[in-house]
Amino acid sequence: MRILGIHDGHGSSAALLEDGVLRKVVEEERFTRIKADSGFPKQAVDYLVDHYPGELKKLDYVAIASSNHDFSLFATKRYPRFDVKEFLTEEERYWIPTLLEGKELNYVEVMKDYVDFNLSHYPLKSIKDPNDANAIRRLRRDYVGEYLGMPKDKVIFVDHHTCHAHHAYFSSTLRGGVLVFTMDGSGDGTNATVHMVGEDGRLKCLYRTKCCNLGRIYQYITLLLGMKPAEHEYKVMGLAAYAKERHIEEPLKVFKQTYFVDGLEFRARIPIKNHYQYFKQRLEGYRFDAIAGALQRYLEDLLAEWIGNWLRHMGLRNVVFSGGVGLNIKANKRVSEIPEVDDMFVCMAGGDESISIGAAQCLYAKQADPQGLRPILTPYLGPGFDHSDLRTALTHPMIKKQYETIGEVDFDDVAAILAEGKVVSILMGDMEFGPRALGNRSLLADPRNPQVIKVINATIKNRDFWMPFTPSILAERAADYLVNPKGLLSPFMTMAFDSTELGRRDLAAAIHAGDMTVRPQIVTAEAAPLYWALIKAFERRTGVGGVLNTSLNIHGKPIVRTPMDLVNEVLSNQTVTLDYILLEKTLLRRV
């Protein structure tokens, strides 16, 4: 059975599932070069058609994630296009009048200078009423069916959180006695769910709510702190670790006055019409790091309480977790440490980019034996580049002017360069799916020297001063560096751990300086043979079983896909300096 999963919202993507095995999953942003691009993922679908023509001609179903999307999502592409200024304009023009003043406004009219129907592949002008959810759903279904030549009855919508839940569970190696939790800002009128596995192997929903606004609060606090919502929440999480306990106490009271856990459910203490304005009024005057610290504490406390209550209630001890809140690695750490949890797994991409996978998995589980769905063990499921792409880059004037070609090298040569304190940029094989670079589109460095942080930030990344870098660690050395008594897996950088004394020494440049935690990619030879071999070569030379790893991109742009992306976006940026570039096996050195 062949199913194409499509997500046409924020972080749009397309996934090909064949007989329960994920063949490929492609994010639209990798082609459009617009971070978290939204709308019908045309270039991602075209890539799959070009590379899997036989499979795409014999599709059994197309599964579209999320039954409902607002018209404004397609007409403005607000999440990828808006920055802080635009979100504040939206707040003043639309949300304050509608939520606080009770006015009935047409979003498209009040935000008309941000509306552009040409942004969407869908024929939006055919929609007479932007509030007609059924018409928008038909538009999406009809367009997708016509584009792929599929009958309308074979194009199926799948509920947003049902997609998150299926990706969380069926992508993991945990089976049987597992509780599946999802949590995000909102999707199809829901922001948190709990599922369990039925006797037939299919997921059964136990709880669904729209009262869990933790993800939405995190989004609005991100905006309140002057950062882009739905993108920079990780910066708030990183900042939180620097907050002093005495500074957290008062702003934490503000958060605690809003939502709480009542047994198995989330409840509101007071009705809040506009979350942004509510917190803006009550948090004014508090330190920025204290607000971040209080928010993170509030999230961790409620999430741990809620999940712990459910585990005790159901008599189960294993957890899988997805949804946008699942990207919060510190909250994941807190949950993993509660005594009710024996094992916990967080999928490689908890955000909406992965619900194309979940939609396909859900439809497969309904139409076939769910036991046929295979775990996702490797992240290298994205698009690659071919030899012509490589030749084009190597002969590009910018490359020829700035770099000399050393020639083909092995990983021992790369390890020697890293050990000298140099930073190496790597593009090899198919790229990673999801928000993390996991060795195939990465910047690598020796993790022992904290001075390399300044080098990377000054010459390449320009990250905020409080944000840590992260390590990729050999699985056989994980116990040396991580406090992980439950032996939890973290192959995709979705968990945080406390560091050991040796970890704080060997991985000094890849540890969060605020609390000494680490967000590792635990690398196995089975899941990442080439990357494992590279790190192993570094270990042979230095005795250190890990490297510093950060994504190969400039701030605000997606991870590079091809060597020409590297040329056009990174090397053309005059503020960027890359000393060494490894393109497959060919090493370039800056002259």
Image (cartoon, rainbow, N blue to C red):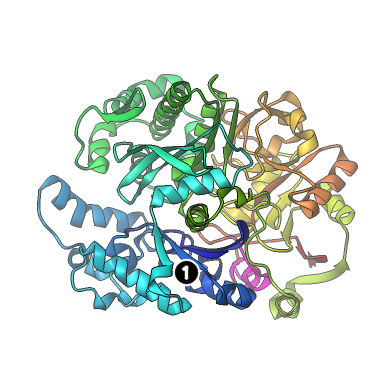
> Magenta residues: mostly which secondary structure?
helix
The quarter of the picture where residue 518 lies is: top right
**With 522 as the anchor, is 569 left or right in this view?**
left
**Span shown in magenta:** 559-573
The quarter of the picture where residue 147 lies is: bottom left
Viewer-proximal residue, 184 or 168? 168
Q: Quadrant of the C terminus?
A: bottom right
User: Residue at 31% of width from left, 25% of height from top?
Assistant: 256
Viewer-proximal residue, 475 or 369? 369
Q: Is residue 312 above or below residue 189?
A: above
**With 404 as the anchor, is 100 left or right in this view?**
left
User: Residue at 28% of width from left, 67% of height from top?
Assistant: 136
Query: Within 10 Å of the Cα at label 1, are there few (<14), some (14-19), or many (20+) other Cα atoms?
Result: many
Residue 105 in view, yes or no: yes
- Residue 366 belongs to the span the image colors magenta: no
Q: Is residue 186 above or below residue 571?
A: above
Please name the residue that numbered disc 1 is placed on. Answer: 41
Viewer-proximal residue, 590 or 281? 281
Viewer-proximal residue, 81 or 161? 161
- Residue 566 belongs to the span the image colors magenta: yes
**Amino acid type for the residue under numbered disc 1:** Pro
User: Residue at 25% of width from left, 56% of height from top?
Assistant: 90
